[in-house]
Amino acid sequence: MGLKAAADRLAVMLATGLYLSYIPLKLFEVLRFPRLRIGTGAGLIGTIEGLLVTPVLPEGSIRFSFFLIAAALLSCWLCGRAEKVLGNHDDSRIVLDEMAGFWTAIAFLPRNPWTLGAAFVLFRILDSLKPWPVRRLENLPGGLGVVADDLGAGIYANLLVYPLLPWLTS
């Protein structure tokens, strides 16, 4: 296997959340359910993966800021490469963008179960609804278009969690 093929396989493996995003798609296929317009469920898998990784993310504003910037840039590159291999813009199997979006949703928030839960629910709702101008971000080219809408949904979710903090941290 050549270096390019190995890099493509690695990009697809990481962008699909270690291939876990294939599970809901296979369930639709095996159970012969029609795909719903609201999605395949793969985004939920990606968000769950983002939540599960949260305990090992860096603490502190500066360290988390550097991590989030690096994660967003790397996600754009990996998702862009994966979408070329998979042959679809923002292929539903790509879930690394949901992970980066969820990490944006929890940025600079206390990491307790209530806050993480609120960020999770709000991010999933906003990622599905894609309020203005988040939906427009999908039209950006390549991996940037794959990731930018999730980062936008994450920003909205983050801003909506802040007013809830008195109830979530008491």
Image (cartoon, rainbow, N blue to C red):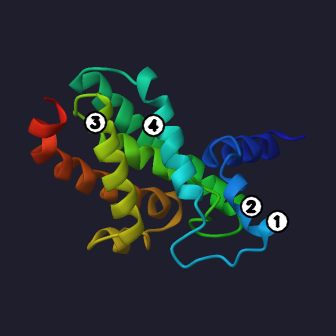
Question: Could you tell which of marks 2 and 3 lies nearer the N-terminus?
Answer: 2
Q: Find the distance from the CA under tag 3 to the CA under tag 1.
A: 35 Å
Structural crowding at the residue carrying mark 4, measured as other residues with C-alpha within 10 Å and reported as few (<14), some (14–19) or many (≥20): some
* Neighbours of disc 1 within 10 Å: few (<14), some (14-19), many (20+): few
Circle 4: element type? helix
Q: How far apart in space, not on screen, are marks 2 and 3 (Cα)?
A: 30 Å
Residues at discs 1 and 2 in contact (Cβ within 8 Å)? yes
Secondary structure of residue under mark 3: helix
Q: Please name whichever residue, 143 or 49, is drawn nearer the observer in this view of the structure.
A: 49
Q: CA distance from mark 1 to mark 2?
A: 5 Å
Q: Disc 1 on helix, strand or loop?
A: helix
Q: Amino acid at mark 2?
A: Leu
Q: Which residue is mark 1?
A: 30
Q: From the top left corner, tell me how far across and down residue 79 is, in percent.
A: 57, 53
Could you say which disc has been placed on residue 27 in the image?
Answer: 2
Residue density around tag 3, few if under 14, some if 14–19, many if 20 or more, within 10 Å? some
Q: Earlier in the sequence, mark 4 or mark 1?
A: 1
Q: Amino acid at mark 3?
A: Trp
